[in-house]
Amino acid sequence: MDESAHFAGLDIGGTTVKAALLNGIGRQVGEGVELRSHGSDGYKATFKQLHLALETICSNNSVELSTIAAVGIDVPAPSSNGVIWGQANLNEDWVGTNIRDEFSKEIHRPCYMTNDGNAAAYGEWILRPGHDGPLLFVAPGTGLGGGFVLGKGQLYEGCNGLAMELGAISVPFREEDGSLPECAGKGPGSLEAWVSLVALRRRLELELSKDENKEHPLAKSEISILEKAFQLRDYCEKEDPLARSIFEQQAHILGWAMGDQSSELDPGLIVIGGGLAETNFRDWYLDHVRAGFEERAPAFYVNSPIPPHGVTTRFDWAIGGDYAAAIGVAHKAIEII
């Protein structure tokens, strides 16, 4: 490997592009860069932003653009072998387009591409140099993403690159009226219908409609239910009982689902990403995740039955922040050279 070479990671979101830069031995160079993605304006508009992100991060770190040997890309949509399979929150012209190959032609360099959950999972694995075992990553956000890294750093993407769509797995929880909550594209009773911003919005609307909560400040507020859902985290940080009850339910169901996944994957380490990692109630939240996990997982996925009965599945918060995915695909770009 030419140590003068550099590798870039481009994390494409619905609204932003985040870029990270690595040197030839895989060390991050400088700080990341964030720009608008214009994903809803079509992939060609986003390509312009990707070019700008590459130019900006190189300029900021006094690196010649010509030294970029390969680029990693991640997208917020299902894709297979570089081709986008679902629109998600992108423009319809993304669907059916080989984004990896098209961008590779524009920059005259090889490109690696995966989805954002896989990218963040790999970034979190890379950022833990003392850990070489498996890592299961789950990130509650607007939706629910995830990824799985096998031991020794092998990213598991499945036959078509579509593995670990954790938001689509089914959980047996029901609303108070016995119905299964719906979530677009994921089916009734999906995990994403319980653990996501979409789920918080639905749950909050149901709770605020009850007489017992009619005096709550959010019930009296004139802002939209979406804005109220965004504020719920602030209320939870202040130990508001309603907010705490909603997040406690979410944490329990997330933990239950991870217990189910552990029976299949035996990950040993489960990392939780998303904005919850930055809250002051994250330890409280994680306690309820563990409680849900212990309710569902067979006992030997919690502790070894053999003395000294060590913990067999650990939980941790993400450490990569906003740039874990960009770092992850930048490292994947090194592998394709």
Image: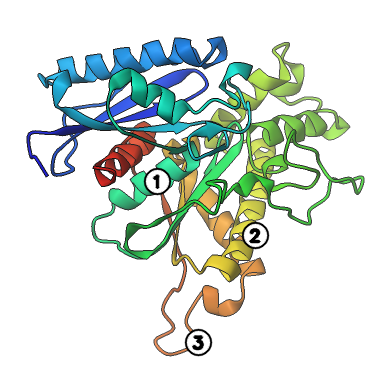
* Chain-order first, disc 3 or disc 2: 2
- Check disc 1 and report its element: helix, strand or loop: loop
Q: Which mark is residue 19?
A: none
Q: Is residue 36 in sight in this rendering?
A: no
Question: Which residue position is annotated with label 2?
Answer: 256
* Mark 3, residue position: 305
Question: Picture quarter containing residue 235?
Answer: top right
Disc 1 marks which residue?
A: 318
| Left or right, 165 with reference to 107 | right
Locate the C terminus and report the quarter of the image it occupies.
Answer: top left
Q: Say above or below: 55 vs 214.
A: above
- Residue type at numbered disc 2: Trp
Name the amino acid, label 3: Pro
Residue 297 position within the rendered picture, expressed as x and y whole percent measured from the top left: 61, 70
Query: Toward which corner of the image does residue 244 lie, by quadrant?
Result: top right
The alpha-carbon separation of the residues under discs 3 and 2 comes to 21 Å
**SS at mark 3 in the image:** loop
Instruction: Determine the residue positioned at 64% across, 45% down.
Output: 167
* Quadrant assignment, res 107: top left
Q: Residue furthest right?
A: 177
- Report whether residue 130 is seen: yes
